[in-house]
Image (tube, rainbow, N blue to C red):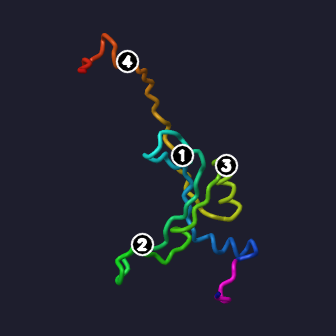
Amino acid sequence: MCSNHTAPTTPAELKGRSENMLARIFRPSKTAMQSGRAKATDWVMEFEPKDARRPDPLMGWTVTSDTESSQVRLTFETKEEAVRYAEQHGIAFQLVDPPPAKRIIKAYADNFAFGRRIPWTH
């Protein structure tokens, strides 16, 4: 355990540290492995990387010296909570609103409709 590094405790220390950080607040899209909207309703705050990732010369793994951007991911129930958190901690942020979802209403019976453009081939 290294005693040289201490966590910032006062708001001034936190603000000085977070001035250089840029965060992105967004709502993640649903994964391709699910049909529902689970885990896609929360808002996420991730930090933009300060340095570019580079390959490790020995192993070839992708490495970075920036811990905040690669390991810290905060989730919030609403967009307002995420924005309030960033403003309270003095974190510059970019808000990315999700595009409206295109809903295509379909019915199973349309596959067998008489006026179907492409005839049923079974």
Q: Is residue 42 above or below residue 93?
A: above
Q: Which mark is residue 97?
A: 1
Spatial distance from mark 2 to mark 1, Cα to Cα?
26 Å
Spatial distance from mark 2 to mark 3, Cα to Cα?
30 Å
Residue 6 falls inside the magenta stretch: yes
The part of the image, by quadrant, that contains residue 6 is: bottom right
Q: Earlier in the sequence, mark 2 or mark 4?
A: 2
Q: Position of residue 25 (x, y in %)?
A: 57, 54
Circle 3: element type = helix
The residue pinned by badge 2 equals 52
Q: Which mark is residue 77?
A: none
In the figure, is residue 27 to the left or right of 14? left
Quadrant of image for the N terminus: bottom right
Mark 2 vs mark 4: in front: 4
Q: Earlier in the sequence, mark 2 or mark 1?
A: 2
Residue 39 falls inside the magenta stretch: no
Type of the residue with mark 3: Glu
Q: Earlier in the sequence, mark 1 or mark 3?
A: 3
Spatial distance from mark 4 to mark 1, Cα to Cα?
34 Å
Q: Categorize mark 3 by other alpha carbons within 10 Å: few (<14), some (14-19), many (20+).
A: few
Circle 2: element type = loop
